[in-house]
């Protein structure tokens, strides 16, 4: 008779969760002593430990702390400012498969505050640029300058940060600013597709700097000072992309 | 998600400033790994991970009352991912067909965690979560019952449902693959 295929599951004394709890310092007393003694002599549990170590390395590679903290701040800020309860006007999309490919040729040039604002510290000669992409059945498509965002479209921001190492991206519309990203400046898509909900036009505000850009502080400055407050200090670079919506 | 019963020996979670950093340091790696495993999409996994922790920070009492923060957060991550995957139910058939093709044409036996992930999507919703607790987290049925507040017979029943759904999912593509006998699960 053919042996059953292994799907995993607990062993006589082995449990991946117990090893995780041991590593997290959640065990005590007899359970701690028993688990430590078992893990020390168990190859299967040692393999779990190696897996946990590999997961830590993957975390720093795939989701470094600044990006993690910015994502949390954005989600919490979104819930805190929503009038009448939980109603974000931008919605992170978990699986936007149509946006998996990357278009790297920048076609949207930096649009530096075309409203006559004067911003001390804003560099206009940087090579940075920003694209807005939307998912289509045929794959990602980059919006042309001034082209309206299709209603309900999954959107993604693609950066060409020049020589800047850090970035923050905020969406500003009639409901106020919302943080989309803060962390290392990717040369390519910013982590996280999203849908722009709500109403009215807006701007995409991208701050590029050599130092980490504090996302929460950016939101506060945008609330207090508008677009004029977007730049954290001299040397930072600002790109503002006007966004309009297509008729529903 | 109900709060599991309190247990002794739980490491204290920090309060106030530094909480986000502490949560990241202690738990984010495991949560991200769970999300990457279930979603198979790095970007979706990052989003799901941040959603899980944002929810925890919005309702800190839930984590504080959890007997094991590690267990609570992995369950929350599993919930989050299964909700995301609910919208893409058809994908598991393609995945099983691919494994069957690799097995037939190249002699590659399905890797157990990959096979499990594909089979999860074929199972009823409640059975999915319990299958993750049993096969991925390697909790015993008694531990699952205590963690989820379900009775031991209910846990057994859900695992039987999972294996029945898995068997049906494999019937056409890999009929000779024998899954564990649900009555023999420890």
Image (cartoon, grey):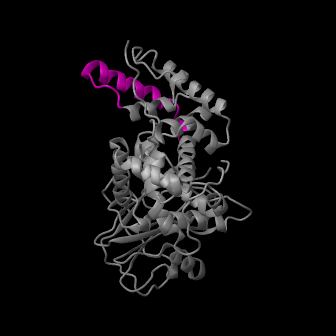
Q: Nearer the viewer, residue A136 or A233?
A: A233
Percent x, y for residue A21?
48, 53
Magenta highlight on residue B15: no
Snapshot quadrant of residue A223: bottom right
| The N terminus of chain A, quarter of image | top left
Furthest-right residue in this view: A84
Whether residue A134 is visible here, answered yes or no, is no
Q: Nearer the viewer, residue A122 or B98?
A: B98
Q: Nearer the viewer, residue A244 or A225?
A: A225
Q: Main secondary structure of the magenta part?
A: helix
Q: Is residue A215 above or below residue A103?
A: below
Whether residue A144 is visible here, answered yes or no, is yes
Query: What's the residue at 32%, 73% (across, down)?
Result: A164
Furthest-top residue in this view: A1
Q: Nearer the viewer, residue B17 or A117?
A: B17
Percent x, y for residue A94?
50, 48
Percent x, y for residue B24?
47, 63
- What span is colored magenta in the figure? B85-111
């Amino acid at each position: 008779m053919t042996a059953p295929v292994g799907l995993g599951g607990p062993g006589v004394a082995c449990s991946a969760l117990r090893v995780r709890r041991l590593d997290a310092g959640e065990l005590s007393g007899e359970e701690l002593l028993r688990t430590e003694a078992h893990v020390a002599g168990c190859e299967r549990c040692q393999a779990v430990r190696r897996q946990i170590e590999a997961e830590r390395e993957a975390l720093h590679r795939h989701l470094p702390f600044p990006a993690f903290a910015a994502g949390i701040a954005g989600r919490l800020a979104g819930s805190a400012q929503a009038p009448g309860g939980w109603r974000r006007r931008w919605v992170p999309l978990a699986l936007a498969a149509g946006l998996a490919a990357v278009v790297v040729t920048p076609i949207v040039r930096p649009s530096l505050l075309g409203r006559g604002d004067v911003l001390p510290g804003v560099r206009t000669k940087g090579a940075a640029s920003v694209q807005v992409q939307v998912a289509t059945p045929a794959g990602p498509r980059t919006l042309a300058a001034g082209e309206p965002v299709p209603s309900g479209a999954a959107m993604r921001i693609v950066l060409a940060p020049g020589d800047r190492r850090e970035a923050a991206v905020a969406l500003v519309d009639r409901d106020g600013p919302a943080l989309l990203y803060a962390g290392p400046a990717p040369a390519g898509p910013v982590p996280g597709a999203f849908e722009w909900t709500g109403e009215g036009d807006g701007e995409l505000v991208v701050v590029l700097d050599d130092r980490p850009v504090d996302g929460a502080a950016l939101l506060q400055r945008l609330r207090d000072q508008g677009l004029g407050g977007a730049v954290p200090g001299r040397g930072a670079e600002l790109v503002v992309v006007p966004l309009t919506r297509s008729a529903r | 998600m109900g709060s599991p019963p309190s247990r002794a020996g739980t490491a204290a979670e920090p309060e106030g400033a530094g909480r986000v950093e502490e949560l990241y340091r202690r738990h984010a790696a495991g949560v991200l790994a769970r999300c990457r495993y279930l979603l198979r999409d790095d970007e979706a996994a990052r989003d799901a991970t941040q959603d899980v922790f944002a929810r925890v920070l919005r309702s800190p009492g839930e984590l504080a009352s959890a007997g094991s923060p590690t267990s609570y957060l992995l369950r929350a991550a599993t919930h989050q991912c299964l909700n995301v995957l609910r919208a893409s139910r058809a994908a598991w058939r393609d995945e099983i067909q691919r494994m069957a093709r690799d097995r037939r044409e190249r002699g590659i036996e399905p890797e157990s965690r990959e096979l499990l992930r594909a089979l999860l999507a074929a199972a009823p919703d409640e059975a999915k979560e319990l299958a993750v607790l049993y096969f991925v987290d390697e909790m015993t049925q008694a531990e699952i019952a205590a963690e989820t507040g379900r009775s031991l017979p209910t846990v057994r029943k859900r695992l039987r449902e999972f294996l029945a759904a898995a068997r049906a999912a494999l019937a056409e593509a890999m009929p000779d693959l024998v899954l564990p006998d649900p009555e023999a699960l420890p």
